[in-house]
Amino acid sequence: MTTQRSDFRFFHRLRVRWAEVDMQKIVFNGHYLMYLDTAISDYWRAMAFPYEAGMMALGGDLYVKKASVEYHGSARFDDMLDVSLRCQRIGTSSITFAGAIFAGDALLITAELIYVFADPTTQTSEPVPDSLRHALQAFEAGQAMTQMQVGDWAALSPGASAVREVVFVQEQGISASIVWDDLDASAVHAVSFNRMQIPVASGRLLQPEPDKGRIGRMAVLRALRGADLGKDVLLALVAASQARGDSEVSLHAQCSAQGFYLKNGFAARGDVFEEAGIRHIDMVQVF
Ligand SMILES: CC(C)(COP(=O)(O)OP(=O)(O)OC[C@H]1O[C@@H](n2cnc3c(N)ncnc32)[C@H](O)[C@@H]1OP(=O)(O)O)[C@@H](O)C(=O)NCCC(=O)NCCS
């Protein structure tokens, strides 16, 4: 049976660069393994699994045991390729991915990648943890990989704090005294958890005036950005603001994230200003 695009639900798109083409003007055969490896990183992101932190939490890591590639056609400079992957089998300690690379509908490559879950210090195999096994199965079955919880600080502070600590304190160097304040106690919080109950994104909604909402502390784990997790948190908080009858919801956007809020229904208002040493702009959505 021939491999087809419809055999896969995960695709990673890339464009062939000059440096990857050999004297025959086709992609050097070894590069396809790199394409597959790049796609695997995206696969974990699509699963909302922050690979490094996630593996650390599981106490193991994945090592390639075998990688085989079969060549059916050639890719050329500037071709747009779709690298597709499917988790095909989960053994006791191994995870097998079937891969294929397409240029449009043309099949260029089929591949098999076998990883072994192992203890990183001894590099001896360990059983694949059930939580990882179930998350992979759920992803391949097309199920949602995150679950949004909207609630108060008493319920959501562990998850929200874990995300803030990694993003604002460790990554952005903002002082803990600014990241947490008394307003958390009265705010509505939204935290997105992945299938392994790891908190991956968070934000909060305040009500500084009776019918006005204010969103803040929006954060997504760095490894998982660009996968719509921030959008999910933002939309959950906007919905909470609208549902309680606010006439508008606003936020102080870091200027680097202004595009994110523009795409999600907010408009800039006023001039750029500094907050916690970072350039910000006020943005608003009127209901
Ligand atoms: C800002 C942040 C919350 C966005 O979350 P995210 O998960 O990366 O964004 P999403 O994947 O949900 O993006 C949704 C859309 O916004 C776009 N987008 C995301 N970040 C963007 C940016 N900085 N500039 C322009 N567009 C952006 C995405 O391309 C996507 O567009 P599409 O719907 O057209 O495909 C996240 O990048 C983050 O935590 N940054 C570090 C902390 C921070 O700056 N917080 C904001 C404080 S105001």
Image (tube, rainbow, N blue to C red):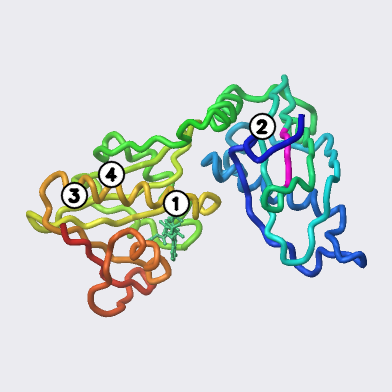
Report, in whole angstroms, how far the alpha carbon at label 2 lies from the one at label 4: 34 Å
Q: Residue at x 35, y 47 (%)?
A: 233
Q: Which residue is mark 3?
A: 241
Residue 29: mark in rendering: none
Is the residue at mark 4 in contact range of ligand 1, meaning its CB lies under 8 Å from it? no
Q: Residue at x 52, y 54 (%)?
A: 222
x%, y% of residue 286? 17, 61
Instruction: Give the image quarter of residue 50.
Output: top right
Q: Residues within 10 Å of mark 4 (few under 14, many from 20)?
A: many
Is residue 132 toward the left or the right of residue 119 in the image? Answer: left
Instruction: Give the image quarter of residue 79.
Output: bottom right
Report, in whole angstroms, how far the alpha carbon at label 2 lies from the one at label 3: 40 Å
Q: Secondary structure at mark 3?
A: helix
Report, in whole angstroms, how far the alpha carbon at label 1 lies from the one at label 3: 20 Å
Q: Is 39 inside the magenta-drawn segment?
A: no
Is residue 279 toward the left or the right of residue 42 in the image? Answer: left
Of label 4 and label 3, which has the lower sequence position?
4
Give the label, 4 or 3, closer to the camera: 3
Amino acid beneath label 1: Val
Disc 2 to disc 4: CB gap under 8 Å: no
Is the residue at mark 1 in contact range of ligand 1, meaning its CB lies under 8 Å from it? yes
Report, in whole angstroms, how far the alpha carbon at label 4 lies from the one at label 3: 11 Å
x%, y% of residue 81? 69, 55
Q: Which residue is mark 4?
A: 189
Instruction: Pick whichever, 243 or 78, lies toward us.
Output: 78
Q: Residues within 10 Å of mark 3 (few under 14, many from 20)?
A: many
State which quarter of the image contains the C terminus: bottom left
- The magenta segment is 97-101
Is the residue at mark 3 in contact range of ligand 1, meaning its CB lies under 8 Å from it? no
Q: Secondary structure at mark 1?
A: strand
Give the label, 2 or 3, closer to the camera: 2
Q: Which residue is mark 2?
A: 87
